[in-house]
Image (cartoon, grey):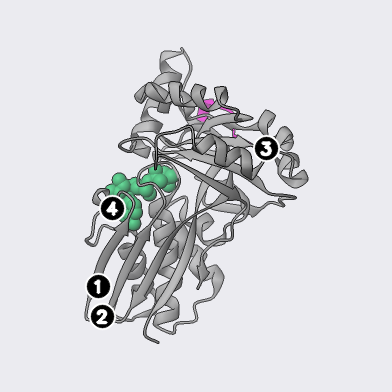
């Protein structure tokens, strides 16, 4: 085999319920991931040693060394199967970097699938998913796509049914937000509000039945009423301009607006593809992207 290309989707969390901080520093989550049709592509070709290159949107913001999540995925897979991590991974980026849309996680999942094929390992899917979970909380979902409830720190997945298409616009912000910083701010806001930020003192988060039903029915109107993101106040606190972006989208016809994951990308729900195209056109050129969900997970092209 000479080259393998894998396409991997971005995600939006249509529910992101954050429990308290655990002794290991992670937070218990109940999150509903929805894969959206904004994609990175990871191409693996044979090489002497491990090499990473990237092209496309915001690539100045991603490391091209062993810390790149795609490189870490290749190394983890090679180690598990006792092979050398000899591969050139080229990442074509369309998912905003540090935007709360799991771009790095997508590249990790893409690299695993691409290297598995290039090296002819034939790793069982559950083995790949287990490796994904070691690489990061959002990586298993990037592999499976569609829609899923994520529990634990988001890595324990239960697939969810989606009964129709949902139309979105994603407005990217200048500069990313660090996911750990946003969780720290969430904890700080909880303490500042007189509450506790510790898992032992807070109820375990759970999936919202109304949201799960809205997905199953494929109803944008029902989904609009059920969208939630416990990290949104923290993201907006760290990046106050997001409040204006959310309001602008709502003023221009979005059914609903929320911060995507830890932000700073803002997600707008629209009733139709035409509505999404019209809303995207109200943002500065290149800063807002229409996309449809659900989207498939990591796919060999
Ligand atoms: P999440 O939604 O999973 O919290 P995110 O979309 O906010 O993640 P990423 O795009 O995954 O954020 O990037 C987070 C950081 O990870 C970046 O600041 C970047 O330096 C680093 N990183 C490492 N590898 C990659 C990669 N392949 N693509 C993007 N970022 C990467």
Mark 2 sits near ligand 1, with its Cβ under 8 Å away: no
Instruction: State the residue at coordinates (56%, 22%).
Output: 251
Mark 4: secondary structure:
helix
- Give the spatial CA distance, label 3 vs label 2: 47 Å
Q: Which residue is mark 4?
A: 59
The image shows residue 74 at horizontal and vertical percentages of 34, 69
Image: 19 above or below 83: above
Horizontal and vertical percent position of residue 297: 55, 61
Instruction: Identify which residue is drawn at 75% across, 46% down.
Output: 216
Secondary element type, mark 2: loop
Picture disc at residue 50: 1
Residue 294 spot, x, y in % from top left: 62, 52
SS category of the residue bearing label 3: loop
Residue 47 disc label: 2
Q: Which mark is residue 20?
A: none
Viewer-nearest of discs 2 and 4: 4
Which mark, residue 271? 3
Q: Is 204 included in the stretch rendered in magenta?
A: yes
């Amino acid at each position: 085999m000479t080259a393998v290309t894998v396409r991997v989707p971005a995600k939006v969390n249509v529910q992101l319920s954050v429990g308290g901080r655990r002794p290991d520093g992670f937070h218990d989550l109940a999150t509903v991931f929805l894969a959206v049709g904004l994609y990175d592509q990871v191409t693996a070709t044979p090489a002497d040693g491990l090499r990473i290159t990237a092209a496309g949107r915001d690539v100045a913001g991603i490391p091209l060394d062993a810390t790149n999540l795609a490189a870490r995925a290749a190394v983890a897979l090679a180690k598990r199967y006792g092979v050398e991590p000899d591969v050139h991974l080229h990442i074509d980026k369309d998912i905003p970097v540090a935007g709360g849309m799991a771009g790095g996680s997508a590249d990790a999942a893409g690299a695993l699938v691409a290297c598995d094929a290039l090296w002819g390992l034939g790793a069982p899917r559950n083995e790949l998913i287990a490796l994904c979970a070691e690489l990061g909380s959002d990586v298993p979902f990037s592999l499976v796509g569609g829609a899923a409830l994520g529990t634990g720190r988001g890595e324990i997945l239960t697939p969810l049914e989606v009964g129709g298409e949902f139309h979105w616009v994603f407005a990217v912000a200048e500069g990313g937000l660090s996911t750990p910083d946003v969780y720290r701010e969430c904890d700080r806001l909880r303490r500042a509000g007189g509450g506790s930020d510790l898992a032992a003192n807070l109820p375990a988060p759970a999936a919202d039945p109304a949201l799960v039903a809205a997905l199953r029915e494929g109803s944008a109107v029902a989904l609009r009423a059920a969208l939630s993101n416990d990290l949104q106040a923290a993201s907006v606190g760290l990046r106050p301009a997001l409040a204006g972006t959310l309001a602008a989208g709502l003023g221009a016809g979005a059914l609903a607006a929320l911060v995507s994951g830890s932000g700073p990308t803002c997600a707008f729900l629209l009733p139709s593809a035409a509505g999404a195209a019209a809303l995207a056109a109200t943002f500065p050129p290149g800063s807002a992207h229409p996309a449809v969900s659900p989207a498939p997970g990591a796919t060999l092209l």
